[in-house]
Image (cartoon, rainbow, N blue to C red):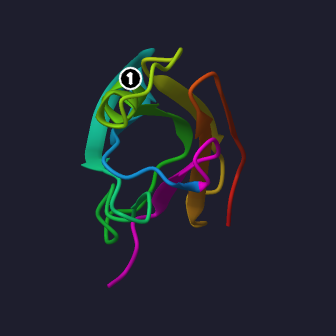
Amino acid sequence: MPLSPITTHILDTARGCPAAGVPLSIELEQDGKFVKLGQGVTNNDGRVTDLLPHDRPLESGRYRMRFETAVYFQAQKIEGFYPYVEIVFEIKNPSQHYHIPLLLSPFGYSTYRGS
């Protein structure tokens, strides 16, 4: 099955495993406001591979992914500091695939452009 042109996965670095069950959404900035394009929930491997239709071309522009981390922490019975994480990134070459990982722990997070 072809992948979405933008994919993500979340690793729980405190537990050393994928973060399953995290709701997230993706938006594109248009005229100074973000418009929702898609949403999903991480699978058992902490991934969402069908966030956007694979046959819809990406647009250049600024995107925002919002991860509802409080849902995950509550399910794990962990008190987290960040109720959600938003990652804003810019796509200049829409013909490429973009992978946006999130490394998560209850009191910190980081991200990078994956492959």
Q: What percent of the width, then of the height, locates residue 101?
A: 60, 50
Q: Indicate left or right for 80 with 74 as reference.
A: right
- Range shown magenta: 1-16
Between 21 and 54, the one nearer to me in the picture: 21
Q: Mark 1 belongs to which amino acid?
A: Phe
Q: Indicate left or right for 102 with 74 as reference.
A: right
Q: Is residue 8 magenta?
A: yes
Image quadrant where one finds the C terminus: bottom right
Residue denoted by label 1: 34
- When the figure is inspected, residue 19 is found, relative to residue 1, above or below; the finding is above
Instruction: Determine the image quadrant of residue 105.
Output: top right
Instruction: Determine the image quadrant of residue 29.
Output: top left
What residue is drawn where x is 27% and y is 45%? 38
What residue is drawn where x is 45% and y is 55%? 58
- When the figure is inspected, residue 29 is found, relative to residue 11, above or below; the finding is above
For the residue labelled by badge 1, is the local secondary structure a helix, a strand or a loop? strand
Q: What percent of the width, then of the height, locates residue 12?
A: 56, 46
Between 73 and 52, the one nearer to me in the picture: 73
- Number of numbered discs: 1
Image quadrant where one finds the N terminus: bottom left
What residue is drawn where x is 53% and y is 14%? 81
- When the figure is inspected, residue 83 is found, relative to residue 27, above or below; the finding is above
Q: Is residue 19 magenta?
A: no
Between 73 and 92, the one nearer to me in the picture: 73
Q: Indicate left or right for 74 with 86 as reference.
A: left
Q: What percent of the width, then of the height, locates residue 31?
A: 41, 18
Q: What percent of the width, then of the height, locates residue 96?
A: 61, 66
